[in-house]
Image: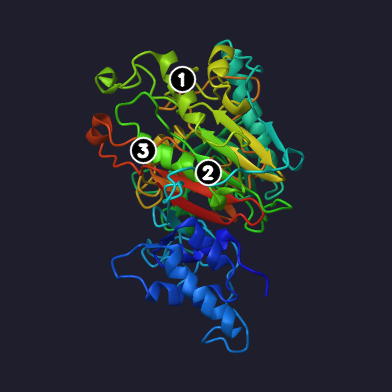
Amino acid sequence: MPRSTPVEVVNELATRGYNAEREAVTLLARADDLEDAIERATETVPDEALTLSADDVAAVVRTADATGSSPGHTDGSSPDTRSGSPATDSDGSGDSATTPAETPDQPPSNPSVSSGTATHENDRRTDSPLETKGSGRDEAAGERTTERSVDPDLRSLDVQGDVTGRSTGTGEYADFVATFRDRYERLSGLLRSRVNHRPTEAVDAMAGGSDAAIVGMIADIRSTANGHWLVELEDTTGTFPCLILKDREIASVVDELLLDELVAVEGTLAGDGGILFVDELHFPDVPRTYRPSTADRHVRAALISDVHVGSQEFANEAWSAFADWLHTEDAAAVEYLLVAGDMVEGVGVYPDQDEELDIVDIYEQYEAFAERLKEVPGDMEILLTPGNHDAVRLAEPQPGFDEELREIMSVHDARFSGNPSTVTIEGVTILMYHGVSLDEVIAELPEEKANYDEPHKAMYQLLKKRHIAPQYGGHTRLAPEERDYLVMEEIPDVFHTGHVHKLGYGKYHNVLAINSGCWQEQTSFQKSVNIDPDVGYAPILDLDTLDLTIQKF
């Protein structure tokens, strides 16, 4: 039997609620039967103990080596301890303290989801597929415990869809027209294969009673006196009214519709031809058959956001514990660090923010962030993208940091790109977006379809619409460009956001959606809007399997 890796040992211990000293992990990794060795070792420690020492483990391993087999497995077999996969309950969930499964009476439009590596139709928030804790320091010596050794030639990190250096917007009317025309052309291309659509001017000329289909941008949504829904669709030739009857199955998705998003409808024209009675409605969506790509070797990425250095509430101890952990053997495969915005707290972002600043100068905030960045291993590939607290333009798409800020944050040769950016790491495509539009989606949609406690559900809606911020003119500031950089033309394997300071994750049509929490304790502003942040969580993604581990610091 192949011996277990330290990562497998830590994962198995975590499922039982234990940590272990580094030497204890090494000893357990040598055991022929990991599960039995852990079972026997945990029986020897006091009930209140949460950390296994080397002494706890040594006798167990020596006994097993002497006998050549472990009790309960006399045939020499060992249980399946697949690296990166969480232990599962009888329902396959990996954690019993989870949100309820979606019920059969929910609308069929609701996304098919799974959480972490689970295979059933559940999703999760802060109850992780595998949650572990650790300081990252050797408990006996108080020092970082390993020197990392990686081959940089094995790595690849490419960025696409970055507006940095390509912004063309001047604020003129023509720029807005160009943005919406580009959005229409690219998203309508995803819908035209599903319906036999005609331009609205051609539909307007068709005889009453004819079957028709339209691909259009939602210009207006309103309810009628009888409780039906009138949706105005616009394309490059004009607009056309479409009626969704309240007793139709598709009426259940009307509350998901946002102005300016693109949809396709099919139905029958009224007798006078002046309105389309809708039978089917299609979103651009991610195909249910989508299969993500994976890396060719075992390598991991840490996906975090919302560090907020400069705030009095910056979780310095949690950050240092995270950085220390990255130096340990358990994190040796974590070769990439992706930070999705809000490196610093910023200045003047919300009312009375100055009263909660630990550092009042914006450049000194970035210098302090750079010092925090120095704590992580110097051989990691680091990518930094901005958020709404950072010193870049607020309007999305946001270009990357300017040269002066890049120079300040050039620690470990960090790389920079704009918000959003599509990052391909060893074949795995990760869409990084800070997440300001999540506020708008949560405000506009019913709570069961989008809420702050389950931010991944709002992310599902953006995947369904294949656009990062479909509604123009709301709370999300959008910059007109010749190209709409917020269209999800390429399906990501992983969708990573932050901004809302809540941990959430799940799968939508096999796309892993992760909102990575934050590194800032609750501010008075957050308290005033009833946000209780999830602090000190680091989602760790296995790029070769897309398994997800949540580390808590």
Residue 475 at what x, y percent from top left? 40, 27
Residue at 50% over, 18% down: 392
Q: Foreground mark, 3 or 1?
A: 3
Q: Is residue 487 left or right of residue 100?
A: right
Answer whether labels 3 and 1 touch (C-beta < 8 Å).
Answer: no
Q: Count of labels shown?
A: 3
For label 3, the SS is helix
Is tag 3's residue or tag 1's residue first in the polypeptide sequence? 3
Q: With respect to residue 363, does 522 lie above or below?
A: below
Q: Where does the image place residue 476, in percent across and percent down from the top left?
A: 44, 27
Label 3 to label 2: alpha-carbon separation: 14 Å
- Looking at the rendering, which quadrant does residue 360 occupy? top left
For residue 247, what is the image quadrant? bottom left
Element on which disc 2 rests: helix
User: Helix or strand or loop: what does disc 1 sit on?
Assistant: helix
Image mark for residue 366: 1
Q: Name the one closer to the observer, 237 or 410.
A: 410
Q: Which residue is mark 2?
A: 326
Sequence-wise first label, 1 or 2? 2
Q: Nearer the viewer, residue 405 or 257?
A: 405
Q: Quadrant of the N terminus?
A: bottom right
Q: Nearer the viewer, residue 69 or 391?
A: 69
Amino acid type for the residue under numbered disc 2: Leu
Given the image, on which type of amino acid does mark 3 rest?
A: Glu
State the CA–CA distance, disc 1 to disc 2. Answer: 22 Å
Q: Residues within 10 Å of mark 2 (few under 14, many from 20)?
A: many
Of the image marks 3 and 2, the number of the one nearer the N terminus: 3
Residue 275 visible at all: no
Rounded to the nearest whole Å, what is the CA distance between mark 3 and mark 1?
18 Å
Give the numbered dot on residue 317: 3
- Side of 155 where 303 appears, left or right: left
* Labels 1, 2: front one: 2
